[in-house]
Amino acid sequence: LPDTAQEKPKEGEVVAVGPGKYDDEGKQMPLTLKTGDRVLFSSYAGTEVKNENDDEEFLIMAENDVLAVIS
C-alpha cells in the first residue's frame, strides 16, 4: 500500500492503569504498562470517554491495543 493509504499510529500518555485481567484459570495477570508511559496505538483502538467536569477526553483501551512504548 502507498504511504498515504496506510494508517498512522497515534501517541499518548498512560494516566492510569487497572489491576490487570484474569486468565482462564482465574489468576490475575499483571500489567506491563505503568502510569506515565508514552505509548503508540492505532487510531481505532479503545473507547473515547469525556470527563464532564472539565471537558477532558480520555481513551480507555486494553493493554494489547498498545503498539509500542516510547522511551
Image (tube, helix red, strand yellow):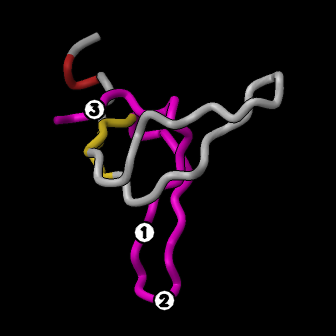
Q: Secondary structure at mark 1?
A: strand
Q: Label for residue 8?
A: 3
Instruction: Verify CB contact (< 8 Å) between mark 3 and mark 2.
Output: no
CA gap between label 3 and label 2 equals 31 Å
Q: x, y percentage for residue 32?
A: 44, 34
The tag earlier along the polypeptide, 3 or 2, is 3
Left or right side of 9 for 58: right
Give amino acid for label 3: Lys
Give amino acid for label 2: Asn
Q: Is residue 56 above or below residue 69?
A: below
Query: Residue 52: within the magenta?
Result: yes
Q: x, y percentage for residue 10?
A: 29, 42
> Disc 1 marks which residue?
57
Residue drawn 52% across the image and 58% down it: 48
Q: Secondary structure at mark 2?
A: loop
Q: Residues within 10 Å of mark 2 (few under 14, many from 20)?
A: few
Give amino acid for label 1: Glu
Foreground mark, 3 or 1, reads 1
Q: Secondary structure at mark 3?
A: loop
Q: Residues within 10 Å of mark 1 (few under 14, many from 20)?
A: few
Residue drawn 31% across the image and 28% down it: 68
Left or right side of 43 for 70: left
Q: Quadrant of residue 70?
A: top left
> Disc 2 marks which residue?
53
Residue, far right: 25
Which corner quadrant holds the C terminus?
Answer: top left
Q: x, y percentage for residue 4?
A: 21, 25
Question: Magenta residues, as a range?
Answer: 42-71
